[in-house]
Image (cartoon, grey):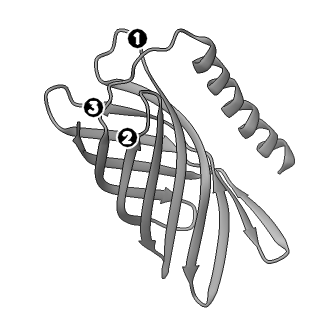
Amino acid sequence: MKKRIKFLFLSAAFVLALGVSAQTVEPAMYKLGAGILIDVGDGGTMVGPHAKYFFTANHAGEAAVLFGNGATFVHGIYTYNSAFPGVNGLSWYVGAGPSVAFGGGTTLFSLMAPLGVEFVIPKAPIAISVDWRPRYFFYENETYFDASRFGLGLRYTIN
């Protein structure tokens, strides 16, 4: 398990370093997007509203409230975003942030590190994202790493 965690963080650090060291390319940006997020993988499917807000051209915050498996999940994620050169509307992002789950009389904390791509449809106020969302859970005196979570987001964008 420690090898997987080390691989995850080294991979995220490599992607972030690559993006920061490369020439900064403006992502296909909007100011605010809100819609629906579907989080799937081991442990079931969660669905709910989410929003993404760009603080600058490359830095954004994302919040979500997801429902599934008798629990409610609240996420807050920072993402670094950068466009793919020469591809109109397509960008990649990497991020990290906390998540809290409530349900069944317990509270579960986790850290999430999404890595994904987002496509903003040219001349339409729609953004579609797909990402890998590995999580490191903290439960009572135990920890658990789950690499099998993925997200699919659909947002209406506002400039």
Residue at mark 1 to residue at mark 2: CA–CA distance: 18 Å
Residue 20 image offset from top left, x and y in percent: 60, 19
| Badge number at residue 55 | none
Residue pointed to by mark 2:
129
Name above or below for residue 105 compared with residue 146: below
Name above or below for residue 75 compared with residue 152: below
Q: Is residue 98 left or right of residue 29?
A: right
Amino acid type, residue under disc 1 in the picture: Pro
Comes first in the chain, label 1 or label 2: 1
The quarter holding residue 115 reads top right
Amino acid type, residue under disc 2 in the picture: Ser
Label 3: state its secondary structure.
strand
Amino acid type, residue under disc 3 in the picture: Val
Number of numbered discs: 3
The quarter holding residue 95 reads top right
Comes first in the chain, label 1 or label 3: 1
| View extreme (bottom): residue | 105
What residue lies at 54% left-to-right and 50% top-to-bottom? 77
What residue lies at 63% left-to-right and 13% top-to-bottom? 21
What residue lies at 43% left-to-right and 38% top-to-bottom? 55
Residue pointed to by mark 1:
85
Residue pointed to by mark 3:
120
Label 2: state its secondary structure.
strand
Residue at mark 1 to residue at mark 3: CA–CA distance: 14 Å
| View extreme (left): residue | 123
